[in-house]
Amino acid sequence: MDFCIQLSSDYPDKHYGGDRVYRDMLDQAKLADRIGFDSVSVTEHHLVNCLMMPAPLTFAVKIASMTERLKILTSVVVLPLHDMRVYAGEVVVADIFCEGRLMLGVGRGAFAYEMERMGVPMDETRERFDESLDVLQALLLDEEVSWQGKWYQFDPLTIMPRPLRQGGPPIMMAVLNPDGIYASTKRGFHIQTTPLSGNHQLLKDQVEAFQRGKADCQKTDDIPTLTLSRVAHLAKNEAEKQKKIAAAHHYYGRFDNIFLGPGLVDHGMITPMPSRTPKEELAESLLIGSTQEVIDKLAPYAELGIDRVIINPNFGLDAQDTMDALQAFAEDVMPHFSSTPVPVDKARKEA
């Protein structure tokens, strides 16, 4: 089981500065590259301070320029917000600058506040996404493409430059519903999902759907993988654990506001509200605790055959504390689930 860090660019305090937020994320990416994480992921969101990244491909290129081996996942890009004739070329250029380390995670959009202010009503996102994905794949695979659909109509054209890899970088679908997971996996897509607030039966259903889809998909060299996303942090003691759980609970209050509604935002800042999940219940589902507690919570994922776990450590905590926790996670947790030895962090050793 591999591990990825979500560079979620949380920005709860405007006075902190967007430049410092992104510098913190780059520091995490550089550390991840040194200490054995498989990848980092960057999301796409506009107009709000939660998961704040309006330019994920730009960020991916910057990360690639400062690292050597990390895979860089867009987790996820919101296809209905883009014109695929423009976006396909941007993907090709980003993949070139990332030296083939880019994986394109895609989704339909989750925040109604964001989508509707960008001119895409939520009730249109499914149709727009499905057609956008088909257009994007065609443009990346074929040299000359014309289209007559509901959302796209254009005469023959060719995206330049052509992709490094046939069909462009691997595509990962963000899907929660088991039926959707099966259908997407059967088409050969990689999958990213989450059991939301820790519903283990839902997770088992998601994994079972993935395994059926993988068995039924057309065999290619790019075998579908299943990635699970979770909020995570290590704590040295019980007091620190409770502090981090409280911070996560506050984060989810903002997230629930923008994801589930009512979508109250003031000058780009999501209004803090009580999380819809009680703190005690949230604490059970999150990967926050001592080294052994986190290992115990990760064990069922390994047993189910999850290929990659994306951990999100960015929910309003101190930047250096997060760096130290990531280092400890690599040294003390990851070796229990991966046969790949944790590299010696020369920068940390010399410091």
Image (cartoon, grey):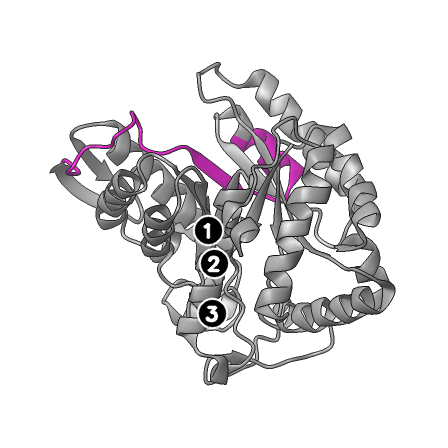
Above or below: residue 348 compared with residue 116: above
Residue 186 makes an appearance in the image? yes
CB within 8 Å, label 2 to label 1: yes
Q: What residue is rendered at 50% in x and 51% in y?
A: 347
Image location (x, y in percent) of residue 253: 68, 72
> Going by the image, does 273 lie left or right of 280?
left
Instruction: Identify the residue under disc 1.
Output: 30
Q: Is residue 340 magenta?
A: no
Image location (x, y in percent) of residue 48: 48, 73
Q: Amino acid at mark 2?
A: Asp
Local crowd at mark 3 within 10 Å, few (<14), some, or many (≥20)?
Answer: some
Tell me the SS state at disc 1: helix
Q: What residue is rendered at 38% in x and 53% in y?
A: 80
Q: Amino acid at mark 1?
A: Lys
Q: Amino acid at mark 3?
A: Val
- Which one is in front, 43 or 24? 24
Instruction: Choose the circle earlier in sequence order: 3 or 1.
Output: 3
Q: What residue is rendered at 48% in x and 56% in y?
A: 109
Residue 27, disc: 2
The part of the chain drawn in magenta is 158-184
> Going by the image, does 32 lie left or right of 291?
left
